[in-house]
Amino acid sequence: MSVRRLNVVQWIGVVVAPAAWALQHVVGYGIAQARCSVGGEHWGISNTVWELALLACVVVLVLISEAAAVAVFRATREANYGDGPPGSGRWNGALPETRLHFFATTAMVANVLFLAILLMDGIASALEKACVGS
Amino acid sequence: MSDYVAGGRAERTVPRSTGVGIWGMAMLVASEVTLFGTFIGTYYYLRFTDLHWPPPGTPEPRVVVPLVLAGVLATTSLPMQLAATAVRRGRLWRARALLVLALLVQSGYLGYEVHDYVHQLHASQPQDNAYSSIYYTLLGADHAHVGVGILLGIWLLWKLGGGLTPYRRNATQAVAFYWHAVNILTLVVIGVLTSAAV
Amino acid sequence: MATAVYEDRLERMWQPRPGVLGWLMTTDHKRIGLLYFWTTLVLFAAGGAEALLMRTQLIAPNQHLLGPATYDEIFTMHGLTMIFFFIIPMTTGAFGNYLLPLMIGARDMAFPRMNALSYWVFLGSGIFIYTSLFLGMAPNAGWFDYVPLANAVYDPGHAIDFFCLGIIFNGISSSLTAANFIVTIFKLRAPGMSFNRMPLFCFAFLAASFGLLFALPSLTADSIFLFLDRNVGTHFFDVAHGGSALLWQHLFWIFGHPEVYILIVPAFGIATEIIPAFTQRRVVAFPLVAVAELLVVFIGFGVWAHHMFATGMPTITVVFFAAATAVVVIPSTIQVFAWCMTFITGNARFKTPLLFIAGFIFMFVAGGLTGIMFLAVPFDQQVTDTYFVVAHFHYIIFGAAVFPIFGGLYFWFPKVTGRLYFELPGQISFWIIFVGTNLLFFPMHLVGLDGMPRRQYTYPAGLGWGPDNLAETIGSYITTAGIVLLLANLVYSWFRGPVAGPDPWHGATLEWTIPSPPPEYNFAVIPKVSSAYANWDYEDREEDRRKLEQGAMVLEQGHEQPVSSTVDGWWREIVEMPHDSPWPIVLAFALSLVFLFVLLHLYTVACFAAGAVGLTLLGWHGEEPQESEA
């Protein structure tokens, strides 16, 4: 891939998954809140349907994001980091390849965490039927 | 290192990038948008808490007029952005004319809205119930931001009266950016407030 | 000899105004950092005095040193002071301001006058809040100030108004600082310093700044609503008129939880620079540590309702927060593992700063483990409002925020003052503080599980809480002694310490390449950066020396600073930085008047003061910093 395209894919990998989780967090909480509150009850929202639909959408987004991050990681594998004592020389790589590799590495790890949160609360909130106090 | 000339001056072929001043405005916008986000979150939180929204005795908001007016305000983003482009090309008079046009529409909008706000206060007060509290606070905050935008526009016109400098070029884009944010915010806020009539 | 010529020119260009006026009008980030440091130290003493008063009151059952009303004021002020007037200004205002431009190879912050404004507003807000204490009307409903206890019915008078307005006032200072840090980190990095070559300290401060920028508006909104409810008669929190008392808690903790990450993340940044210097090894898994700093704050925005698990929210809403809370611990753990691996695979020299970092890791892990326990809602509901919670957050705040601050004071003392501190008293001060804090906070776990509630001015005899409380109070005195020794060591070292060169520790980052204390202009030559450990890139430093001889990249024709592209640090343009200015202190004063008049309910006069603020802004922007054609 060209550097230009790598840049675009990198940003997809970095930004889409956190944005998807933020969306699911706000909207999912809002749906649950509407379902269980005086003002929202009469709308008759089916909590399970909405939560699962939301979960499906955002999981797809996170998987796309992770795929993007992995793609950039693999494309820039030669530009990896040195490690070790000061002045050992393998550290200094070329730009923008090292920067792309850096963002791809971070995104790969971060996106897994977001997926974990999504699966946990998406499934839990979909399964729960009654509006019981905790 | 080939980018640099001895003595540290950049060559003129260096690509443009967003200046420090624009980033500063972006920070202000981010903070204010978040503030409005919390106000809007409060609105919906209170809506879900209450069975009737608006509560009995409080008039429902009008839908058409506020939305149309917000739309008219939003159109001022065009002259503001065109003014920013004009100063970048050095066309000072064109920029000034566009700014004056935008200011006239924005001031007209604010003038009407303030009049309407006072008029609404006759029928209901923020001290009536939680709905009116959040309604007047959210709406008032939006009007305040429009007011600040008008002051920024007047300041910018005054600055541009003295000619063009790189600082003033950046300032024009920064103020335009502020107005884009306020215009979108106004559309969202009016949308939220009129959703009570749904 | 050409080097001396260029340095001389730079020195004359950047010379500050002499005397007190120079300090009042300063825009130099180093001076502002020092101003923050001294002010914060005074406020830390106040917060510490409040703590000692509480601990002395609680030394045994049924004591009468403080009555219940006074106790309420003291614990509220202790919380407010330590959070808003010690940790935040010490980490962001003192350490951040002083070190951030040095670490990125810049000559100042992106907005130097706004930086000064941040300080003067901070000072104003501190005076504002403490005036309430001297007037006997200090805030008294806890630092989290829950309604309905804090509304006009149950808390009439001005105490909570001081809280609402003081918090907003202080928040302005932090928001301005946050905006300044973000733009500085994005735009003013030395050319060549792309994101992957930026020190981890800067990642930490970037994360904390984003946290402050996006969290403070929630607190501002909350405080505005409360002020309106109390003084204008609105009903945001009034259940009888359609409001919600829980709304306060939601808005507060939407701010409050990111706030606690904002408290510790800069301290992580400090730790993450001390470790490479004293292990002479790059930090293991650099990209993961960098992203962990950012993730902790980002995910931390989604966990707020775990502070409300005992309020009876429906389970289907609670799961969102429990899930996010479970995952937010992982980035912190990644960092701890990385640091421990760096210790193990490096060449650790346990000088005082590294001792404090070791102590920090110990306390942070302990506090973190109790924090995870709160994730279990049933357990949380048992220990809410007991001393178990107090133990948890003090292990975290004292351990994970204050220990690195102490370590950082020792670490950068040679850079700021040009002198070395005395090592033996330093190590002794660490051990005294370590023993003292564990004695102070560990028994709180036990007594909390035994049922002792928080925020109570005394407790009855016969419940078995006495011995633990006695131990805690003794611990508080020991801790105080340790802190006094620490400060005495630093003061004495300032006068009598041996001269330190530019680089006593063989540190990793750019601040160690310049003299101690740094000259006004920081860097004589804009440094070439090829990695996040610039001081260990000997070839680059050689090249800088050669460039200084030739006068290349010296930028001495004005108050100049290069601006780079955001992501990759490519050279973009040169900007002219504003010099000493009277506008920041004038604006802060005008803003103080606004808050004063609103507090006194003189709203029309407040509007005039706001007009004065506007006029000051006009004067401020009358002066246009020069920017090159880019």
Image (tube, rainbow, N blue to C red):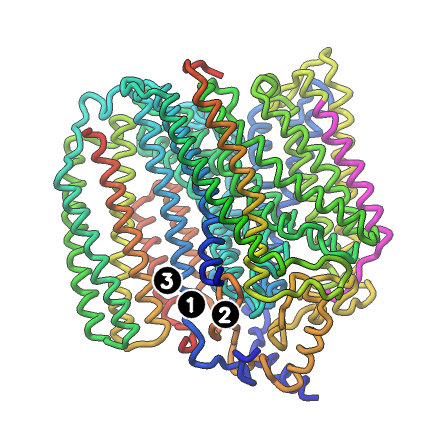
Label 2, residues with CA under 10 Å away: few <14, some 14-19, many ≥20: many
- Comparing A95 with C248, the one in front is A95
- Comparing B137 with B6, the one in front is B6
1 or 3: mark nearer the eye: 1
Residue under pointer 2: C563
Q: Amino acid at mark 3?
A: Leu
Q: Amino acid at mark 1?
A: Ser
Residue A116 in sight in this render: yes
**What stretch of residues is rendered in magenta?**
C416-445
Across and down, in percent, residue B49 comes to 33, 22
Residue under pointer 3: C617
2 or 3: mark nearer the eye: 2
Residue under pointer 1: B17
**Residue that appears at 47% across and 69% down:** C581
- Comparing C48 with C184, the one in front is C184
Report the magenta stretch's main SS. helix
**Residue that appears at 20% across and 75% down:** B93
Q: CA distance from mark 2 to mark 3?
A: 25 Å
Across and down, in percent, residue C45 comes to 66, 44
Give the quarter of the figure containing the N terminus of chain B.
bottom right
> Relative to residue A55, is residue C190 drawn left or right?
right
Q: CA distance from mark 1 to mark 3?
A: 27 Å
For label 2, the SS is strand
For label 3, the SS is helix
Same-subunit check for callouts 1 and 3:
no
> The numbered mark 3 sits on a residue in which chain?
C
Q: Are marks 2 and 3 in contact (CB under 8 Å)?
A: no
Quarter where residue C75 is shown: top right
Label 1, residues with CA under 10 Å away: few <14, some 14-19, many ≥20: some
> Relative to residue C573, is residue C351 drawn left or right?
right
Q: CA distance from mark 2 to mark 1?
A: 10 Å
